[in-house]
Image (tube, rainbow, N blue to C red):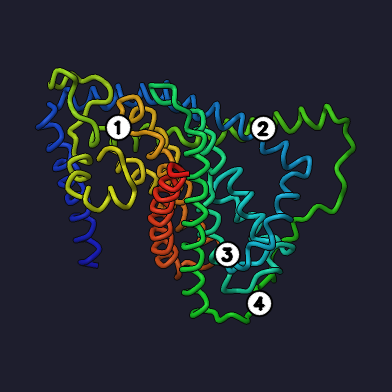
Amino acid sequence: MKNSKRKAILQPITFLAVLLLIFGAVGSKMGMVNMLSTLMNTAYELLLDTVFYIMAVAVVAGALSALLSEFGVVSLINKILSPLMKPLFGLPGAASLGILTTYLSDNPAILALAHDKGFRKYFKKYQLPALTNLGTAFGMGVIVTTFMMGLQSPKGESFLAAALIGNLGAVVGSIVSSRLMLLRTAKVYGKTEPCDTEGVEETEQTQQKEKQSLGMRIIDCLMTGGKSGVTLGMDVIPGVLIICSLVLMFTNGPSAAGTYTGAAYEGIGLLPWIGDKLSFILRPLFGFSSAQGIAVPITALGSAGAAIGLIPELIKTGAAGAWDIAVFTAMCMCWSGYLSTHVAMMDNLKCSKLTGHAILSHTIGGLCAGIAANWLYKLFLLL
């Protein structure tokens, strides 16, 4: 009883002390009025310049994804990828459908498959928790990739090749993450126990869809897929506005005149300072053009949507180029906000006790994705 009372008193005091320390330090450098003004102006600029662009990309990508699924392209790709799953990921071929599902949507999309008897029956018990790592590594893949491809450097340079190489880096990270997770789950469950299907609903269609004309099928897919893009675009707003605004304040410096004016995108330059101190590690591993690049993968830990929201400003100021885009694509895809989804996903799979190892495995996988993209882009430039 005494401990709970003490906690009830100490917790808010500690929180307020930390909050005042952080914002007091920032405010002492920028000025409290300028700090608050910059925070609001940055959030407003991000909403107009970044969030609506991400939403537009999500709507178009969602419509395309629905068409690919409706006309069997996803099923065809699944059949092509299935033979690669066991040697690469240590998972049954059915897991390739999870890759496609999450690549076309978001991390939790794989959970719908995991609760389907027709999907679950192909897995051993030790393989099921690894679906969290596999799905997260490809979550928001089409959104991130399309966004990167749509960017251009101030000189008009296309980032198409860099984005595709980033996808290869994400594949490397997903393999590392899944394999590390399987090493742990095999020790916990063994490799022979089948996956439990008792109480799992059968979600396969039992009735044929009402016949529609080709035109109606296309329109229905476009509208349904587009609506899912709007939902995704709305979902990323809190992450982009809150996380990005704070990260940018810790990333950027004062105005061009060297003073603080309360304008958008001003900051105290903390993350670049840390990046400079760690450049002897970061540059050979990830090849960042600028120390500011460290802000993107750090933000991707919590939100991929927020992370890609940082990139246009980095490109505009010359702090990022094609090389960085390859690394950003790989790490944003592979991590895709796993710190904010892993706990819920593991709980949904009834594997909460393995959450810590899932997070550790995916942290290593994301780092490997960035390193792989860096060296793959170097190889690309040599060819």
* Label whose residue precedes the other's in the sequence (1 or 3): 3
Give the spatial CA distance, label 4 vs label 3: 21 Å
Image location (x, y in percent) of residue 41: 30, 21
1 or 4: tag closer to the N-terminus: 4
Task: Single out the mark in the foreground, 1 or 2.
Answer: 1
Q: Which mark is residue 319?
A: 1
Could you say which disc has been placed on residue 194 in the image?
4
- Say whether disc 3 or disc 2 marks the residue closer to the N-terminus: 2
| Residue under pointer 2 | 63
Task: Name which residue lies at 56% across and 61% down.
Answer: 131
Residue 107 in the image: x percent, y percent? 54, 50
How far apart in space, not on screen, are marks 2 and 4 (Cα)? Answer: 37 Å
Amino acid type for the residue under numbered disc 4? Pro
Query: Type of residue at label 3?
Result: Leu
- Nearer the camera: disc 4 or disc 3: 3
CA gap, disc 1 and disc 4: 50 Å
Q: Residue furthest front?
A: 383
Which three-letter amino acid code belongs to the residue tagged 1? Ala
Q: Which element carries disc 1, helix, strand or loop? A: loop
Q: Amino acid at mark 2?
A: Ala
The local crowd at label 3, few if under 14, some if 14 to 19, many if 20 or more residues have their Cα within 10 Å, is: some
Camera-nearest label, 1 or 4: 1
Say left or right for 122 vs 215.
Answer: left
Q: Secondary structure at mark 2?
A: helix
Distance between mark 1 and mark 2 Cα atoms: 33 Å
The picture quadrant where one finds residue 227 is: top right
Q: Identify residue for label 3.
A: 88
